């Protein structure tokens, strides 16, 4: 299989080098002023801006900057260090996460643009996948390296869990539009590596945080982040597999869903209607109890991750939409209730505290407390809209409209497009962090939110039409 994949890589690169990726025309950044305020949900605006923003990421304001996708020498390596005007800044190396997320962004842009108008996005997907498989993949031990530079040199060979689950997702998503069997084969090969090397044998679907290159040494602390994106990747694999392969994938989805609701999730003390997932877990997969500090936030400190609460609530509901265990919905609602009670500001609709203590209170020493962080707002908007439309939860309508405005009018740069890093609740929601990209901030959560709008329109058009016709929050 690997020899066939290498042959496909060579043929694909030759084709793409000959054809090239035509630079997109200078892009007019999307502006919220063009949103039709007479509608509850202006789906056409979302459709247009999903494409516009992908072009900005790929090529910048002039089609010649951004991640470098529209430059003649683009080799599939996405340059994800960009200033406010989408100009490239120094990038020593990038991660398998950033590479995977840039691939996914172009998948969604291609879906939105369609085959005739989206060829540039499809070519970006193909080149991005080939760079991922050629340069991030470890032919000796399997799995994906953590850091690789633009020349394809390995900078850090560790097998970070987060960096090894995102390629499964990206490859499954890529296959959904390319129909290249090598893309699916690579996703399934990595699934085998992941389930063989990363899973804790003492617990079903418990995932080790990371390893040295040869998987001989565990690196990091047990956390929910890797689990979240493994569950997400499995759902994407479900969508593109059939027969015995899909049955195997579905078995993992069932086990992981049960592990989430039965082990990772905990009711808040003294409450039965709300609860949380912790970020860090001990060796027995119980919520970490070490005192919180910023220095130990990612290495064992106690905190509930409300950003992942709402993301997992959404993923559980999407799993149920696909036909999985409807009893998981109870946990999804409890995760939402925790966020609504402690983190979602009733005025802005945004998630002000993307982490809290296990009682929902902000943690002393967390410098992010005053800020609306970009990724948590995208997940909040997506989840609220999803539960409003799919689950008929009308009480989320006003909350969604509030966070939609926060996200599209305030968190989005109205002059140059793209997202600021955050908004400061202490300073009239002034933007903080004007850069557009780095190895942690790629257009993944944004694309997720916008793609969900388009998916909901395609599957629930009557519900959206009803909201648009009866919209009492519209002008």
Image (cartoon, helix red, strand yellow):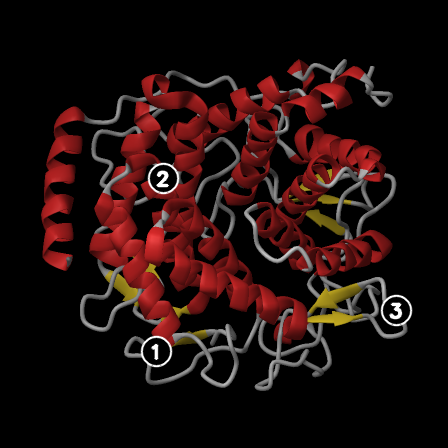
N-terminal-most mark, 3 or 2: 2
Going 67% across and 54% down the picture, which residue do you hit? 313
Q: Where is residue 409 shown, x and y percent of the image?
A: 70, 28
Residue carrying label 2? 176
Q: Identify the secondary structure beneath mark 2.
A: helix
Count of marks overlaid on the render: 3
Q: CA distance from mark 1 to mark 2?
A: 32 Å
Q: Nearer the viewer, residue 219 or 315?
A: 315
Determine which quarter of the picture holds residue 292.
bottom right
Badge 2: how crowded within 10 Å, few (<14), some, or many (20+)? Answer: some
Q: Is residue 249 above or below residue 68?
A: below
Badge 1: how crowded within 10 Å, few (<14), some, or many (20+)? Answer: some
Decide if residue 66 is in sight here: no
Going 46% across and 59% down the picture, which residue do you hit? 250
Quadrant housing the N terminus: bottom left
N-terminal-most mark, 1 or 2: 2
Going 33% across and 85% down the picture, which residue do you hit? 216
* Horizontal side of residue 226 vs 95, given as left or right: right
Q: Identify the secondary structure beneath mark 1.
A: loop
* Horizontal side of residue 149 vs 260, given as left or right: left
Q: Nearer the viewer, residue 130 or 438?
A: 130
Q: Where is residue 450 shown, x and y percent of the image?
A: 57, 33
Q: CA distance from mark 1 to mark 3?
A: 41 Å
Mark seen at residue 442:
none
The residue at the far right in this view is 270
Q: CA distance from mark 3 to mark 2?
A: 42 Å
Mark seen at residue 212:
1
Going 61% across and 39% down the picture, which residue do you hit? 420
Closer to the eye: label 1 or 3: 3
Determine which quarter of the picture holds residue 271.
bottom right
Residue carrying label 3? 271
Determine which quarter of the picture holds residue 327.
bottom right
């Amino acid at each position: 299989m690997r020899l066939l994949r290498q042959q496909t890589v060579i043929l694909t690169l030759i084709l793409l080098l000959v054809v090239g990726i035509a630079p997109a025309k200078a892009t007019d950044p999307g502006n919220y002023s063009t949103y039709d305020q007479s509608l509850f949900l202006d789906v056409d605006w979302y459709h247009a801006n999903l494409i516009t923003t992908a072009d900005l990421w790929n090529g910048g304001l002039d089609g010649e900057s951004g991640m470098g996708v529209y430059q003649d020498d683009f080799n599939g390596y996405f340059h994800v260090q960009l200033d406010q005007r989408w100009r490239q800044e120094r990038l020593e190396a990038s991660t398998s996460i950033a590479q995977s997320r840039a691939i996914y962004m172009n998948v969604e842009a291609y879906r939105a643009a369609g085959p005739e108008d989206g060829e540039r996005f499809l070519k970006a997907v193909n080149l991005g996948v080939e760079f991922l498989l050629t340069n991030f993949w470890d032919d000796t031990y399997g799995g994906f390296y953590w850091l690789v530079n633009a020349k394809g040199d390995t900078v850090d060979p560790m097998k970070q869990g987060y960096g090894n689950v995102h390629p499964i997702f990206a490859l499954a998503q890529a296959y959904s539009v390319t129909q290249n069997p090598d893309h699916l084969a690579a996703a399934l090969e990595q699934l085998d590596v992941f389930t063989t090397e990363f899973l804790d044998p003492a617990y079903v679907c418990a995932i080790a945080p990371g390893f040295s290159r040869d998987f001989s040494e565990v690196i990091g602390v047990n956390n929910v982040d890797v689990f979240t994106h493994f569950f997400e990747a499995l759902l994407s694999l479900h969508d593109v597999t059939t027969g015995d392969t899909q049955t195997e994938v579905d078995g993992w989805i069932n086990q992981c869903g049960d592990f989430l609701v039965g082990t990772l999730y905990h009711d808040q003390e003294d409450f039965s209607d709300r609860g949380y997932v912790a970020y860090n877990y001990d060796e027995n997969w119980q919520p970490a109890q070490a005192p919180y500090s910023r220095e130990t936030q990612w290495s064992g400190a106690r905190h509930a991750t409300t950003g992942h609460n709402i993301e997992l609530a959404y993923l559980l509901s999407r799993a149920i939409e696909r036909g999985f265990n409807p009893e998981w919905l109870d946990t999804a609602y409890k995760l939402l209730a925790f966020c609504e009670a402690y983190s979602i500001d009733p005025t802005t609709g945004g998630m002000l505290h993307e982490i809290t203590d296990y009682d929902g209170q902000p943690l002393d020493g967390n410098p992010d407390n005053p800020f609306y962080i970009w990724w948590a707002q995208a997940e909040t908007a997506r989840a609220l809209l999803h539960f409003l439309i799919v689950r008929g939860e009308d009480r989320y309508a006003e909350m969604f409209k509030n966070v939609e405005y926060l996200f599209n009018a305030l968190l989005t740069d109205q002059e140059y497009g793209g997202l600021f890093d955050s908004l400061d609740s202490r300073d009239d929601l002034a933007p903080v962090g004007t850069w557009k990209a780095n190895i942690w901030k790629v257009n993944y959560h944004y694309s997720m939110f916008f793609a969900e709008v388009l998916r909901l329109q395609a599957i629930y058009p009557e519900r959206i039409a009803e909201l648009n016709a009866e919209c009492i929050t519209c002008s």
